[in-house]
Image: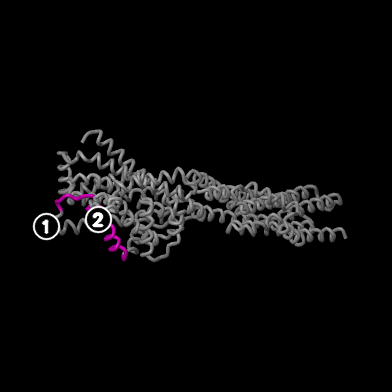
């Protein structure tokens, strides 16, 4: 075997890995995030977890990828560790599909249908159909189907290249000696299988390489057996690396994958070599093993180990928990842990996590607002400290959300997912600004406390009416975002215009008090600053409402501007009705206050 054969083998491995990636990506996009959502909604039924783990892995062609997704879901708190155990078991079964597809090359029937199923025929056909779909189809789903078929063709092109590069091994003098050593010292085979799989981070690819070499007829079952055992251990490296820096449960999920494969490998090693020591080697042990033999044993191993360990899923969980001890996690860490970078490869799940954090951010912004306006009536330094801590968390959320969404935008996304990212970036910024204006209100309260500033009963009553209106618009904004509810969102702008009218009227009334000498200049400045901050909070609620209204539109700016234009021109009957109702509830109360003051 020359250096050129080695280069060809390396190129074949590269094509094989790339084909798997392209095919898995196409299948995942075709599923539209449904696989990840199904994983998220798993019940505690271990059998359904195993089945779903097998289906998802068979679809994306990688047990490592499935386990990494599981690690991310567990880290984000979406999936429990007990659910993860079943999915990981199923992932080991699903990963055997690739090897079973490759074994179709051994079909020798002359029948037309079976000949078409041979990869040497099926792969080029799939690639041709795929490129036609990818280049000529207009629908997004058809292009994604084309991508999947192209990946299938590339995968087998890599497989064919590996088999061609391995052909000279038939006459190799060194390889039989290496294989004999591995057969007599099984630990060498286990190490070789583990190291190769860990290096390329794909058991499907390493099994494919083994099948390519086996196609030359130079490998017997005695040699292949320990290598396959090692490959099942080596595939655990990817989720272990993915769990670095993750939560305790995420680390436990990765360890469950490792323990599952270690226990299964030890069980098979003891049973097989113990049986050989007691009963002697079976007839096929020293005979050549082809692609079919490797695929079948790989499947047998994973199915058998899964069946044996399903009753002990709870034990695996306990072992993982004992390996990684619990540590108390702060509320900040729990919130920010939802934004797990491991989920970026699954945009549908990543966007769901973003929704959770934005919802929490909105709740914190409202809480800070309510706390800050309470200080205007009764000052409490402990409350000020609490507001500062919450504002710090809101700022951290903004920073993490923006970076997460920007990272997500570089992934392969559908049009709706791209629009969703844009909407969420705007929502994050608006909630952060609401938090800032609440902090400004806290500073107004501090200034009133330090300088012993007091307002007249009339001014306090006016602020109270405005505070109620702003509280309502904040509550509307959060409800609209929680369900992306356009009906609720359309209630926001009329109330915002009402608040604008109230602020203008309150400023005029305050000027009258200043002229009449019923209010000091210093108090007047603080009063006007309070009005400004309340008005700005309402403005950002308006922005949030417009984002929700335009969230399903392809041209959000056009929709938002048109809505505002129609509304403020009083040509939208729904808007006018809401506006008149809000004016009666809030603006009329301000007018009555003015009349009472002047009487």
- At label 1, counting other C-alpha atoms closer than 10 Å, the crowd grade (few under 14, some 14-19, many 20 or more) is few
Q: CA distance from mark 1 to mark 2?
A: 22 Å
In the rendered image, residue 313, in percent from the top left (x then y), is placed at 33, 63
Magenta span: chief secondary structure: helix
Task: Give the left or right position of residue 507, taking residue 362 as reference.
Answer: right
Q: Quadrant of residue 300?
A: bottom left
Instruction: Tell me, yes or no, whether the highlighted magenta stretch contains residue 308.
Output: yes
The span shown in magenta is: 285-311
Q: Residue at x 88, y 60 (%)?
A: 599
List the residue tagged with mark 1: 280
Q: Residue at x 85, y 60 (%)?
A: 595
Q: Quadrant of the N terminus?
A: top left
The reply to whether dot 1 and dot 2 touch (C-beta < 8 Å) is no
Question: Which of the two residues, 455 or 312, is positioned nearer the viewer here?
Answer: 312
List the residue tagged with mark 2: 296
Question: Which of the two residues, 452 or 400, is positioned nearer the viewer here?
Answer: 400
Farthest residue, direction right: 599
Q: Is residue 311 visible?
A: yes
Tag 2's secondary structure?
helix
Task: Give the left or right position of residue 244, taking residue 264 as reference.
Answer: right
């Amino acid at each position: 075997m020359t250096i050129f054969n080695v280069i060809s083998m390396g190129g074949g491995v590269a094509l094989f890995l790339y084909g798997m990636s392209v095919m898995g990506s196409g299948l995942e996009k075709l599923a539209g995030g449904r696989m990840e959502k199904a994983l998220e909604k798993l019940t505690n039924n271990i059998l359904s977890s195993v089945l779903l783990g097998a289906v998802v892995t068979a679809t994306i062609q990688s047990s490592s990828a499935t386990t990494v997704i599981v690690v991310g879901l567990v880290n984000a708190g979406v999936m429990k560790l007990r659910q993860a155990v079943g999915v990981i078991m199923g992932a080991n079964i699903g990963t055997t599909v690739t090897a079973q597809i490759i074994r179709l090359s051994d079909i020798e029937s002359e029948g037309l249908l079976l000949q078409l199923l041979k990869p040497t025929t099926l792969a080029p056909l799939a690639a041709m159909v795929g490129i036609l779909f990818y280049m000529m189809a207009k629908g997004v789903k058809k292009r994604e189907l084309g991508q999947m078929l192209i990946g299938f063709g590339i995968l087998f092109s890599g497989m064919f290249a590996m088999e061609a590069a391995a052909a000279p091994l038939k006459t190799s003098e060194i390889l039989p000696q290496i294989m004999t050593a591995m057969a007599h010292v099984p630990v060498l085979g286990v190490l070789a299988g583990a190291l190769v799989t860990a290096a390329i981070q794909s058991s499907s690819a390493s099994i494919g390489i083994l099948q390519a070499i086996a196609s030359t007829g130079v490998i017997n079952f005695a040699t292949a057996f320990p290598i396959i055992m090692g490959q099942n251990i080596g595939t655990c490296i990817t989720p272990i690396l993915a769990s670095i820096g993750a939560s305790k449960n995420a680390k436990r999920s990765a360890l469950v994958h490792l323990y599952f494969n270690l226990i299964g490998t030890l069980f098979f090693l003891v049973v097989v070599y113990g049986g050989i020591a007691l009963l002697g080697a079976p007839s096929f042990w020293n005979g050549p093993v082809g692609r079919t033999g490797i695929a079948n044993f790989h499947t047998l191993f994973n199915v058998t180990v899964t069946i044996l360990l399903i009753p002990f899923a709870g034990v695996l969980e306990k072992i993982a928990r004992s390996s990684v001890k619990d540590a108390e996690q702060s509320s900040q860490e729990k919130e920010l842990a939802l934004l797990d970078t491991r989920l970026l490869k699954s945009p549908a799940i990543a966007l769901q996590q973003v929704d959770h954090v934005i919802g929490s951010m909105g709740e914190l912004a409202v809480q800070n607002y309510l706390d800050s306006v309470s200080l205007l009536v009764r000052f409490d330094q402990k409350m000020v400290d609490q507001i500062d801590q919450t504002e710090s968390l809101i700022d951290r959320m903004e920073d993490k959300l923006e970076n997460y969404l920007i990272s997500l935008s570089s992934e392969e996304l559908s049009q709706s997912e791209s629009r969703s990212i844009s909407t969420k970036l705007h929502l994050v910024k608006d909630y952060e600004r609401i938090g800032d204006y609440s902090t400004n209100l806290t500073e107004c309260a501090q200034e009133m406390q330090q300088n012993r500033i007091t307002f007249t009963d009339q001014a306090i009553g006016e602020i109270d009416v405005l505070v109620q209106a702003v509280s309502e618009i904040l509550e509307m904004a959060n409800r609209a975002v929680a369900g992306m509810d356009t009906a609720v969102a359309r209630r926001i702008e009329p109330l915002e215009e009402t608040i604008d009218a109230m602020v203008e009227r309150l400023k005029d009334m305050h000027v009258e008090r200043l002229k009449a000498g019923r209010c000091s200049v210093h108090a007047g400045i603080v009063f006007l600053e309070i009005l400004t901050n309340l008005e700005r909070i309402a403005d950002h609620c308006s922005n949030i409402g417009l984002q929700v209204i335009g969230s399903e539109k392809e041209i959000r700016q056009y929709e938002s501007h048109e809505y505002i234009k129609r509304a403020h021109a009083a040509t939208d009957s729904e808007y006018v009705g809401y506006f008149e109702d809000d004016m009666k509830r809030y603006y009329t109360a301000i007018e009555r206050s003015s009349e009472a003051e002047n009487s």
